[in-house]
Amino acid sequence: MSNKQLSAGDHITSKCTKCKDTTNHTIVAMVGDKVAKVECNTCGGIHNYRSAAPQKPATKRKTNPAKPAKTSKTEAEWEALLNETDPAAATPYNMQMSIKSGDAIQHPSFGLGRVISITRPNKMEVYFRSGVKLLRCTIA
Ligand SMILES: [Zn+2]
């Protein structure tokens, strides 16, 4: 919120019929607290104030597609994590292993995986290249 009081001499953006565009104007006359007349800084024409285009941003920003909110990471992110995981650094999988979310594991059948989440007292979801598997584990 701007509490700045406009007055004659201030600059304001208005539509100009001569320029056929929204240009910078200087306020020439006020009626009450409303701008009455403005002078176009581009063509010098004086005319009634026309509020500039609707208050919408000129460029629509729809760059955020709906994100799945269930897990902190998307499948693509797990895939990327897997790609940068050194297989030698992964813990070989066994049912007694202590594990926490995000750990890298090496499974005899599924290969390299990253732990997505611990789902039950002794179950974990692991992202493998072949898909997400539910495995037994011991929670760290
Ligand atoms: Zn103009």
Image (tube, grey):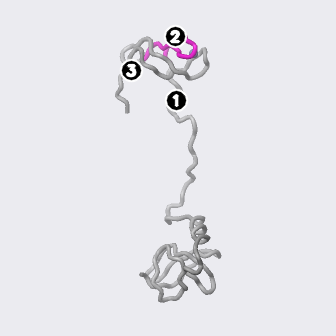
Residue 18 placed where, x, y %? Answer: 60, 14
Disc 3 to disc 1, C-alpha distance: 19 Å
SS majority, magenta: strand
In the figure, is residue 58 to the left or right of 122?
Answer: right
Whichever of labels 3 and 1 marks the residue nearer the N terminus, that label is: 3
Whole-percent x, y for residue 67 in the image: 54, 57
Q: CA distance from mark 3 to mark 2?
A: 18 Å
**SS of the residue at dot 3?**
loop
Give the percent coordinates (x, y) of residue 25.
50, 18
Residue at x-position 52% and y-position 75% = 115
> In front of the other: label 1 or label 2?
2
Q: Which mark is residue 6?
A: 3
The furthest residue to the right: 130
Q: Which residue is drawn at the image coordinates 56% and 64% (left, top)? A: 74
Question: Neighbour class for label 1 at 10 Å: few (<14), some, many (≥20)?
Answer: few
Circle 1: residue type? Pro
Residue 54 numbered mark, or none: 1
Q: Which residues are magenta?
A: 35-49
**With respect to residue 112, does 53 lie above or below?**
above
Q: Position of residue 119 (x, y in %)?
A: 47, 76
